Amino acid sequence: MHTTSDQILLQLKTRGPVQTKDVAAAVAVTRQAARQHLERLAAEGLVEHVTERMGVGRPRRSWSLTALGNQRFPDTHAQMTVELIEAVRGEFGDEGLDRLIKRREAATEVGYRQALEGAVALEARLDRLAQIRAAEGYMAEWSRREDGAYLLIENHCPICAAASACQGFCRSELALFQMLLAPAKVERTEHILAGARRCAYVVTPWTPSTSEP
């Protein structure tokens, strides 16, 4: 994405909801210019806002993408994928589809483990995994929380249509993350298919029990 409007859409995709001043700072324009871009995008149906009153002063607008705005970030081969899923389900039933998903999970695990080779520490594996997922279109990133746990975020799902048609893909991905980051605990806390803006996973490092010798 190169234009200012495209940069704003990307900011809302990865950081939204955000206020006008934060959008301006992120794309290096004045607040007035950011407001003009946002209002034009709102007129196109790509963004929307809610007005929040925060203490003394004028109410602040908090901007986020609309469903139409989210469509600017493509779902890879969505229609074809859904048709293939329904064809497999119709031909082989749900059990056959589950076997197909497990085979995909096993193949993906092999590829990911090769990419993670040499990354022993949890942070190193998490960083490598986020890079892989980002390259695959998930807009992935990670950070460390104050409590010592980590947050793996995927701001976009390039297979959302497929996952909607068969949530086995989402179960498979969670299981894959758990295997790759073991013995750390991986828990999905936000889910795009449940209406969240993003998918988020809390990764809690494993610590030996104090009761163990």
Image (cartoon, grey):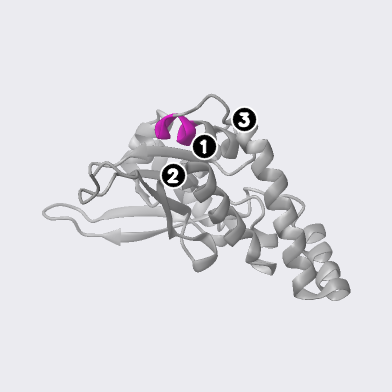
Could you tell me which secondary element the residue under label 2 belongs to? strand
The label nearer to you, 1 versus 3, is 3
Could you tell me which secondary element the residue under label 3 belongs to? helix
Q: Is the N terminus in the top left, top right, bottom left or bottom right quadrant? A: top right
Amino acid type for the residue under numbered disc 1: Ala
Q: Is residue 178 left or right of residue 170?
A: left
Amino acid type for the residue under numbered disc 2: Leu
- CA gap, disc 1 and disc 2: 7 Å
Please provide the residue range marked out in magenta.
Answer: 121-127
Between 25 and 184, the residue placed more toward the observer is 184
Amino acid type for the residue under numbered disc 3: Ala
Residue at image position (47%, 42%) is 181
Q: Is residue 87 left or right of residue 135?
A: right
Q: Position of residue 172 (x, y in %)?
A: 61, 57
Any mark on residue 38, and which?
none
Q: Is residue 191 magenta?
A: no
Q: Is residue 118 left or right of residue 211?
A: right
**Residue marked by disc 3:** 115
Q: Quadrant of residue 117?
A: top right
Estimate how packed mark 2 is, as few (under 14), some (14 to 19) or many (20 or more) residues with alpha carbons within 10 Å.
Answer: many
Q: Is residue 168 left or right of residue 187?
A: right
Q: For the stretch drawn in magenta, what is the main secondary structure?
A: helix
Q: Position of residue 122 (x, y in %)?
A: 41, 35
**Mark 1 touching mark 2, by CB under 8 A?**
yes
Between 98 and 2, the residue placed more toward the observer is 98
The label nearer to you, 2 versus 3, is 3
Which of the marked residues, 1 or 2, is nearer the chain's N terminus?
1
Residue at image position (38%, 52%) is 17
**Residue marked by disc 2:** 152
Q: Relative to 160, does residue 194 appear above or below in the rendering?
A: below
**Residue marked by disc 1:** 130
